[in-house]
Amino acid sequence: MRREGAGISVVIPTLNEQTRIARALACTASPGVERIVVDGGSTDGTADTARLLRADKVIRAQPGRALQMDAGYREARGEVVLFLHADTRLDAGWREALEAALADRATAGGAYRLRFEGAGWGLRAVELGARLRSRLAGLPYGDQALFVRKRVLDAAGGIAPVPIFEDLDLVRLIKQNGRLALLPVCAWTSPRRYARNGALRQVLRNQAALASYFLHLPRARVAAWYRRRPAA
């Protein structure tokens, strides 16, 4: 997979992530890895910081993770596209694990193992739940750094401009086109949403949102509810 002209494109959607973007760029700096930052209109200098940190491309897109992911994918030159949240870093060995998984031609994409920066039994329980959800239901989320063969996205016409659940749609697309690989390497992400809303409350919100996905409820309404900060 590491032959000349192939490689990996890392797409990092951002919106006011100046203080966090360095971790995502630093952990993915590797020969042959293309790092594309897709900014959704930050006002804190995120795009300028990404350029200073030598991102290969910094482009502008309309705000919205699905829109930004699609814009980044269309700029990607690698045979594999890895979608990385700006507040997430991958452990050493992430590239080798990805390449080993995709050496199996039946593998269409995959995800990493979720870990949170920070201590506490609540976060450890969330990590365990994510591992069980990924293993038993085959449903990793976007904060687990989803990756996919670019040809799969090409055939699908890219990432649909949905207001929420773009990660679940991507997982479904991967599974429709081959095997979903769950890698043992960790993706360390910020627990800020859990800290803000409370671990239990956020887990319940996630489960309610997941149920709405399978019930095919209107996504715009679900997105508006999910992004509204719950009352104290």
Image (tube, grey):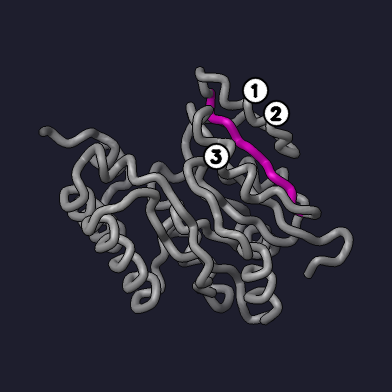
Q: Callout 2, which amino acid?
A: Arg
Circle 1 residues within 10 Å: few <14, some 14–19, many ≥20:
few
Q: Are marks 3 and 2 in contact (CB under 8 Å)?
A: no
Question: Label for residue 51?
Answer: 2
Q: Are marks 2 and 1 in contact (CB under 8 Å)?
A: yes
Disc 3 from disc 2: Cα separation: 14 Å
Q: Secondary structure at mark 3?
A: strand
Disc 3 from disc 1: Cα separation: 14 Å
Tell whether 213 sits left or right of 29.
left
Q: Callout 3, which amino acid?
A: Pro
Q: Secondary structure at mark 2?
A: helix
Closest to the camera, between mark 3 and mark 1, is 1
Q: Residue at x 34, y 46 (%)?
A: 191
In this view, 211 is above or below 132: above
Q: Earlier in the sequence, mark 3 or mark 2?
A: 3
Q: Callout 1, which amino acid?
A: Asp
Q: Residue at x 10, y 33 (%)?
A: 232
Residue 218 at what x, y percent from top left? 29, 47
Asked where in the image residue 196 lies, by quadrant, the reply is: top left
Residue 18 at what x, y percent from top left? 53, 28
Q: Which residue is mark 3?
A: 13
Residue 81 at what x, y percent from top left? 65, 56
